[in-house]
Amino acid sequence: MSQKDRILHDEGFFRKFSQKTFEIVDSPTSFIIALILLLLWAISGLTNTVEEIEVAEEKNLTEEE
């Protein structure tokens, strides 16, 4: 068994990793940070979509003239 396989199959490693992940994620601060990032991502997506629509409309107007 390779070293990588031993690390991945070692219950102690997985238990430590999962416990630390749980401690980091299971906090109000991380939830609020994730929520803010999600809102910023959604707003930036909407902004980019509106800009793309405006550019496409301008392009169509110039082609019609």
Image (tube, rainbow, N blue to C red):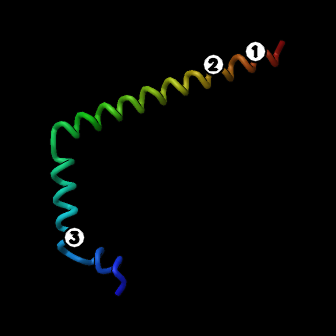
Which residue is at the front of the view, 64 or 7? Answer: 7
Residue under label 3, please give it.
13
Q: Residues within 10 Å of mark 1 (few under 14, many from 20)?
A: few
Name which residue lies at 48% across and 26% down: 46
Mark found first going from the N terminus, 3 or 1: 3
Residue under label 2, please give it.
54
Query: From the viewer's perspective, is residue 61 above or below residue 30?
Result: above
Q: Is residue 59 left or right of residue 9?
A: right
Q: Is residue 39 left or right of residue 51?
A: left
Q: How far is the residue under mark 1 from the one under mark 2?
A: 11 Å
Q: Is residue 56 left or right of residue 36?
A: right
Mark 3 and mark 1 residues within 8 Å of each other at the beta carbon: no
Residue 14 drawn at (x, y percent): 22, 69
What amino acid does circle 2 point to? Glu
Q: Please tell me whether mark 3 or mark 1 is closer to you in this view.
A: 3
What amino acid does circle 1 point to? Leu
Mark found first going from the N terminus, 2 or 3: 3
Residue 5 drawn at (x, y percent): 34, 79
Name which residue lies at 31% across and 31% down: 36
Mark 2 and mark 3 residues within 8 Å of each other at the beta carbon: no
Name which residue lies at 48% across and 30% down: 45
Which residue is at the front of the view, 30 or 57? Answer: 30
Residue sitting at the far front = 3
What amino acid does circle 3 point to? Phe
Name which residue lies at 21% across and 48% down: 25
Query: From the viewer's perspective, is residue 57 above or below residue 36?
Result: above
Q: Residues within 10 Å of mark 2 (few under 14, many from 20)?
A: few
Q: Residues within 10 Å of mark 3 (few under 14, many from 20)?
A: few
Q: How far is the residue under mark 2 from the one under mark 3?
A: 52 Å
Quadrant where the N terminus sits is bottom left
Q: Is residue 39 left or right of residue 57?
A: left
